[in-house]
Image (spheres, grey):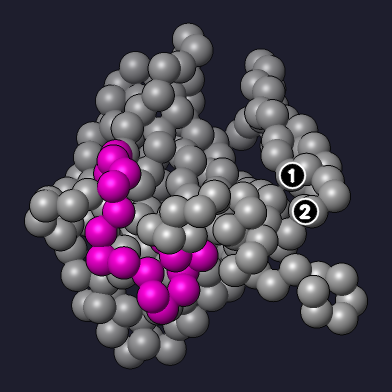
Amino acid sequence: MPSGGKIPAPQRIERLCGASGDRLTAYSGFPECPGHLPIACMHKTIPRREGWRFVMLNTNEVASCANVVGTPPAGKPEELMEQIRKTGRENGAGYNGGVSKKQLEWLKNELETAEHKKEKVIVFSHHPLYAAPGLTALNDREIPAVLAAYPCVKAGISGHHHPGDFGFHEDIPFITTEGMIETEKENAYAIVEITADRIVLNGKGRTTSHTLPIR
């Protein structure tokens, strides 16, 4: 073990993810990440309480690591990364991912349906959609622009950036929860509670708690 008692990141990931080489490289974002993973590629709306819609984005849909063996790629991450480089942004890296144009249209349809039904929406994703410099989704301009166009969107909750972060875009609060990989001796997770006038993310272990008034 290195000086200071810290376990190198690859070993910490292996302890959490088990012996599978695919899982190790897929979730670490290391250069040896395989081209395909035996996991499902999904974006969906999960079962919801009355008056709310919970939208799950798949920000690994367009990424250096594809999702399902034998399926055609949903997009070209290198094209998104090139656009990012041309604009001088910092998130054009192989450990970040994005969504396809098809998924972006699906998101718009979900939000239009929510507006029609007078539902409130929380959007969840692995990669942050705002804040967390350098680790946001490859579509970190397009997705927030879509969300800001629909008043039904009340919050975004993401992970990926292990130190955590928080910020507002067009009055929408975006929470990035702290990662678990560095928590050898404590936990890191949160429970979301929704009341009539607020969204409360109750952090456990090293995860920061947030209280968001519903605008």
Question: Is 209 one of the magenta-colored residues?
Answer: no
Q: Residue at x 87, y 81 (%)?
A: 3
Disc 2 element: loop
Residue at 67% from the left image edge and 56% from the top image edge: 181
The image shows residue 81, relative to residue 140, as above or below, that is below
- Residue 36 in magenta stretch: yes
On screen, 214 above or below 103? above
Q: Residues within 10 Å of mark 2 (few under 14, many from 20)?
A: few
The residue where tag 2 is placed is 183
Which percent across, then down, holds residue 71?
Answer: 12, 51
User: What x and y, as percent, mark residue 16?
Assistant: 61, 50
Res. 142 in view: no
Residue under label 1: 188
Q: Which residues are magenta?
A: 25-42
Q: Which quadrant, please, contains the C terminus?
A: top right
Q: Which residue in the rendered view is the most extreme toward the right? A: 4
Residue 15, position in %: x, y?
63, 54
Residue 85 falls in image quadrant: bottom left
Report the amino acid beneath label 1. Ala
Residue 172, percent from left and from top = 56, 47
Q: Hey, what amino acid is under mark 2?
A: Thr
- Whether the residues at callouts 1 and 2 have beta carbons within 8 Å, the answer is yes
Residue 25 shows in this picture: yes
The main secondary structure of the magenta stretch is: loop
Quadrant where the image shows the N terminus: bottom right
> Nearest the camera: 18 or 158?
18
Earlier residue among tags 1 and 2: 2
